[in-house]
Image (cartoon, coloured by chain):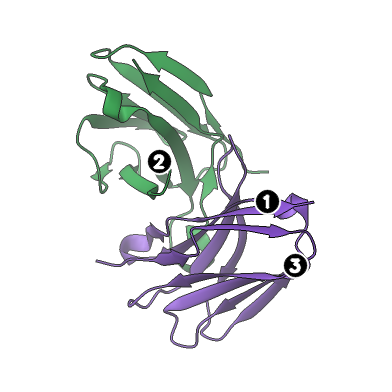
Chain colours: A green, B purple
Amino acid sequence: DVKVTQSSRYLVKRTGEKVFLECVQDMDHENMFWYRQDPGLGLRLIYFSYDVKMKEKGDIPEGYSVSREKKERFSLILESASTNQTSMYLCASSFGGGGYHTEAFFGQGTRLTVV
Amino acid sequence: TQLLEQSPQFLSIQEGENLTVYCNSSSVFSSLQWYRQEPGEGPVLLVTVVTGGEVKKLKRLTFQFGDARKDSSLHITAAQPGDTGLYLCAGEGSNYQLIWGAGTKLIIKP
């Protein structure tokens, strides 16, 4: 089975802290994604990566950065956490290509609270 | 900009009833996926539809892709409490990215 593992299920951080969210996938997928999910807003794409060391901004990249040094690992960094970044963060991966290959496999999510 | 609108946003029905969830857009999608998400977990893929007019069945769930590949529906027959969850549709956009609907929160009461 495809497995996408996020480093933490729950995190509580203080305003201004630098926060690292880690994600690892074991299916050799080319694509990896970071989303945040808020009630009524669905999944919003923060950043994605098609390959090692490559990254592209999604719809809401402000206040975030990412790192992909190895194919299996994609990290999300909150440079200076703010209360409006309190949310559920979801990591996903997929094969390259279209059609059935866009199927996204998700981690269990990290519920981040910034106080 | 490609957008997907899901309706209804929230649905609460009794066990045994039927229901339909809709996913609509003005844009054409190469493929469309339906996911289900349970509280505290990530979404899990239910089905992918690729061909206009395609119908797929998964036990009591029936998925349909519109002929013009702009819309899709999910019909559940004789809903069970285990069907409770957040249902999300996602269309394949440019560069193979997924465009997400906001989701339908479904509650099935015993």
| Dot 3 and dot 2 residues touching (CB under 8 Å) | no
Q: Tell me the chain of label 1.
A: B
Mark 2 crowdedness (10 Å alpha carbons): few <14, some 14-19, many ≥20: some
Q: Label 3 is placed on what type of residue? A: Glu
Q: Nearer the viewer, mark 3 or mark 2?
A: 3
Judge whether B85 appears above or below B22 on screen.
Answer: above
SS type, badge 1: loop
Mark 3–mark 1 distance (CA, rounded to whole Å): 13 Å
| Residue tagged 1 | B84
- Going from N to C along the chain, the mark reached first, 3 or 1, is 3
The residue located at (35%, 47%) in the rendering is: A44
Mark 3 crowdedness (10 Å alpha carbons): few <14, some 14-19, many ≥20: few
Give the residue at the far left of this rendering. A62
| Residue tagged 2 | A38
> Mark on residue A105?
none
| Residue tagged 3 | B17
Mark 3–mark 2 distance (CA, rounded to whole Å): 29 Å
Q: Residue A59 placed where, x, y %? A: 25, 48
Q: Label 2 is placed on what type of residue? A: Asp
Horizontal side, residue A67 vs residue A32: left or right: left
Mark 1–mark 2 distance (CA, rounded to whole Å): 19 Å
Quarter of the figure that contains the N terminus of chain B: bottom left
Q: Nearer the viewer, residue B100 or A92?
A: B100
Displayed quadrant of residue B56: bottom right
The residue located at (53%, 42%) in the rendering is: A106
Q: Label 1 is placed on what type of residue? A: Thr
